[in-house]
Image: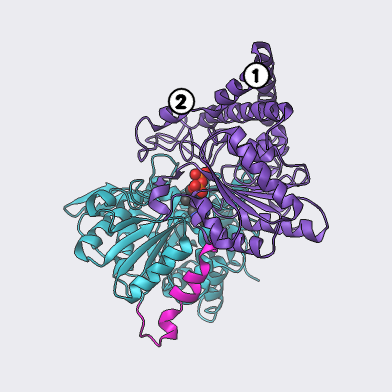
């Protein structure tokens, strides 16, 4: 399944938005977290600054999100992970409200109650969770609902290679296969689960091979490339939409930052990231677009300017939004 | 305190890993399983430096398969090993609760005492750094509620080491909860009162013996873990207003030192139970009830006060989180309230 010019350009611009968003976040996250603004003796304080708490960034992993989400409609469901920004952006979650949530502001998706690992956008049918392996069962449920409602909606569960060793992975694949549900399971193999390399935690090389245990198609994409993910993702989504059941995809992708911001990455071989960045999927897609005559200097500059603008506006919106009143803490336990 | 020879000041994280290391040297059947406990040394440094000393056969990084490795700890313990398993955050218990609760906690009983399960399950608890609803809970009361697990909740480095030694030597399953905000990590604000002198040689702090963290005559404050540190600071604040607070650090919930609580409340006549766990159906209610059951002999001067996380998940946003988790200021206010109300 070849991407159209429009799809290629959408993937390119969306990857740029994701990258810019994550790079700005890496800087904003450090505000207020370093000496001398923190407790004496600390090198860093995770609980300080405008964006406290853990922060997992997805720079380098853009192809997985855009290559799959390029095939989705607003009515399709995406369930993401603790590293959720790229999925949310690719699914069309509004950047301003998402950023405000990450800043804990009243204008955020969850009025500041959820935070970066817990983004909920019912309108764009996006959610995520900080619990590893938690994305698969709700995606199965969304697919079940689609069938019961008589809709041709598809559900996508994204998860990391680390999550593929969680019980929910196996239970969900079996259930979706048994009931032939319209789900696409997409594993992001960025080689690492915090400090544990995939080879140290997973008995087989490719999680895609685990599909045979459940009698569903399984494909591994060996290259961190939007077009390759697009092709494989397109088949899986089309298959689900046709009513032919679930599929499993594993994409080899790259984590450019630490597991979370502030991670000293002492476990990571020196120079690994520099090496990975040489195969950055964004310039690769730009080259592809240029070769096909779909992008020139002026077009690229216009895209970059747009990307800068939407990302800047999102952060400005978040910063200038008010915090919720503390009395709000007691609200929304129930509706 | 007169320092014994070989006593230095350690953070709670250092004290815990020292205890584990010393017990591993003493007893070859002790080994550790968990996520990122090897090279990383544990996300909260509870196993720092242990991989280099003991190697990957005894300091075992696991896949993200908590049911499998915690269940495996139970299985290995039944065969005579003494496993320590780390559940990275207590909040993740949901994915492995069956192995913890229906097996680790019950097999000894169901076997009529024939199966011994010397497992230490250790885990990180607590909020205060805006890690939101799935990474900030305490939940020790959930596990204390259900029979079959000893529940250890240290508040400082000295106790952390001695309680870990006791936990490893115990022939029963022990669930050991360390609060992130007292571990003394270089990347998270913490209460410095938790960093204490710690003797180098191994020593055991017995279970079921509360500690008087601060003596006082007007109000008894009962707490565990980081809340003990907050209570001590609150007591110092209150002292400026002439309120003399006694702080009782329970140290373990199972077994529970009810007598120490009763003795102190008998002396002060006023009780504040301050907790970072959920307020409803938890530790605060339990302590209040044990005093209530002794009202035949204890004379209260004021109705009991409880502070805890009030019936909501932990919100992310800073002002909401700060309002939800009891802070030093809330404790001081509660003590004032105790001094100005009286029983009917
Ligand atoms: C059930 C559960 N166990 C452990 C964790 C802690 N944890 C958070 S992210 C992570 C690694 C996840 O690795 P992977 O699934 O490969 O995703 P990646 O971080 O590489 O995107 C771990 C162990 C968790 N959040 N939930």
Residue stretch rendered in magenta on the structure: B94-116
Closer-to-camera residue (B68/B174): B68
Q: Does the magenta stretch include residue B91?
A: no
The residue nearer to you, when weighing B92 against A307, is A307
Q: Distance between the residues labelled 2 and 1?
A: 20 Å
Q: Name the residue under label 1.
A: A304
Q: Nearer the viewer, mark 2 or mark 1?
A: 2
Q: Position of residue A335 (x, y in %)?
A: 78, 56
Q: In this view, does B241 lie above or below B153?
A: above
Residue visible at 64% across and 38% down in the picture: A231
Which residue occupies 67% across, 36% down? A90
Q: Which chain letter goes with mark 2? A: A
Residue B100: within the magenta?
Answer: yes
User: Any idea which chain is the purple one in this picture?
Assistant: A
A34 or B122: which is nearer to us?
A: B122
Would you identify the image quadrant in which residue B258 lies?
A: bottom left
Q: Quadrant of residue A18?
A: top right
Residue appearing at x 55%, y 66% in the figure: B284
Q: According to the rendering, which colour does chain B have?
A: cyan
**Residue A118, image x and y in percent?**
63, 47
Q: What element carries label 1?
A: helix
Is disc 1 surrounded by few (<14), some (14 to 19) or many (20+) residues within 10 Å? some
Front-most of residues B229 and A210:
A210
- Residue tagged by mark 2? A278
Q: Where is residue A165 in the image (x, y as percent from the top left)?
A: 49, 56
Question: Is residue A81 among the parts visible in the rendering?
Answer: yes
């Amino acid at each position: 399944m070849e991407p159209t010019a429009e799809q290629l350009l959408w993937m390119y611009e969306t990857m740029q938005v994701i990258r810019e968003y994550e790079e700005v976040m890496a800087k904003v996250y450090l505000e207020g977290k370093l000496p001398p603004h923190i407790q004496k003796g600390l090198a860093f304080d995770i609980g300080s600054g405008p964006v406290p708490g853990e922060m997992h960034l997805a720079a380098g992993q853009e192809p997985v999100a855009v290559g799959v989400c390029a095939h989705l409609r607003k009515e399709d469901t995406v369930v993401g992970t603790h590293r959720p920004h790229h999925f949310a952006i690719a699914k069309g979650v509004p950047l301003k409200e998402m950023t405000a949530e990450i800043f804990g502001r009243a204008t955020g998706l969850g009025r500041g109650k959820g935070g970066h690992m817990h983004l909920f956008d019912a309108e764009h049918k996006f959610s995520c969770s900080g619990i590893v392996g938690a994305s698969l069962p709700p995606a199965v449920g969304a697919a079940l609902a689609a069938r019961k409602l008589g809709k041709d909606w598809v559900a996508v569960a994204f998860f990391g290679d680390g999550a593929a060793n969680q019980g929910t992975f196996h239970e969900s694949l079996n259930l979706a296969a048994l009931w032939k549900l319209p789900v696409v399971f997409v594993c992001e193999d960025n080689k690492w689960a915090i400090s544990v390399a995939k080879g140290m935690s997973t008995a087989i090389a490719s999680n895609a091979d685990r599909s045979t245990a459940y009698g569903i198609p399984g494909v591994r994409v060996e290259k961190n490339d939007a077009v390759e993910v697009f092709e494989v993702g397109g088949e899986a989504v089309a298959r689900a939409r046709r009513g032919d059941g679930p599929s499993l995809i594993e994409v080899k992708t790259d984590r450019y930052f630490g597991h979370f911001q502030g991670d000293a990455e002492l476990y990571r071989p020196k120079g690994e990231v520099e090496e990975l960045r040489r195969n950055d999927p964004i310039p690769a897609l730009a080259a592809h677009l240029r070769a096909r005559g779909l992008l020139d200097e002026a077009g690229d500059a216009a895209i970059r300017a747009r990307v800068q603008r939407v990302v800047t506006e999102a952060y400005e919106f978040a910063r200038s939004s008010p915090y919720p009143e503390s009395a709000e803490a007691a609200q929304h336990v129930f509706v | 305190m007169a320092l014994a020879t070989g006593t230095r000041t350690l953070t709670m994280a250092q004290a815990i890993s020292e205890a584990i290391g010393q017990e591993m040297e003493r007893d070859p059947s002790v080994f550790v399983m968990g996520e990122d406990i090897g090279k990383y040394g544990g996300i909260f440094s509870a196993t720092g430096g242990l991989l280099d000393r003991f190697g990957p056969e005894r300091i075992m990084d696991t896949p993200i398969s908590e049911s499998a490795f915690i269940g495996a700890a139970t299985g290995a313990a039944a065969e005579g090993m003494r496993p320590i398993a780390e559940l990275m955050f207590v909040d993740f218990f949901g994915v492995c609760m069956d192995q913890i609760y229906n097996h680790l906690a019950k097999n000894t009983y169901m076997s009529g005492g024939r199966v011994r399960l010397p497992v230490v399950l250790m885990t990180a608890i607590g909020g205060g750094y805006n890690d939101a609803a799935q990474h900030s809970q305490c939940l020790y009361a959930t596990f204390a509620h259900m029979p079959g697990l000893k529940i250890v909740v240290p508040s400082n480095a000295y106790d952390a080491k001695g309680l870990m030694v006791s936990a490893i030597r115990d022939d029963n399953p022990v669930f050991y909860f360390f609060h992130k905000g007292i571990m003394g990590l270089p990347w998270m604000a913490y209460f410095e009162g938790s960093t204490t002198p710690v003797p180098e040689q191994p020593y055991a702090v017995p279970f079921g013996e509360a500690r008087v963290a601060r003596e006082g005559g007007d109000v008894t404050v009962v707490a565990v873990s980081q809340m003990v540190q907050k209570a001590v600071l609150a007591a110092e604040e209150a002292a400026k207003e002439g309120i003399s607070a006694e702080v009782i650090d329970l140290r373990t919930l199972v077994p529970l030192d009810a007598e120490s609580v009763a003795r102190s409340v008998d002396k002060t006549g006023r009780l504040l139970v301050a907790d970072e766990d959920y307020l409803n159906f938890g530790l605060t209610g339990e302590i209040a009830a044990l005093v209530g059951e002794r009202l035949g002999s204890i004379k209260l001067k004021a109705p009991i006060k409880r502070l805890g996380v009030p019936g909501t998940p932990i919100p992310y946003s800073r002002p909401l989180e700060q309002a939800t988790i009891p802070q030093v200021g809330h404790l001081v206010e509660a003590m004032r309230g105790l001094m100005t109300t009286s029983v009917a």
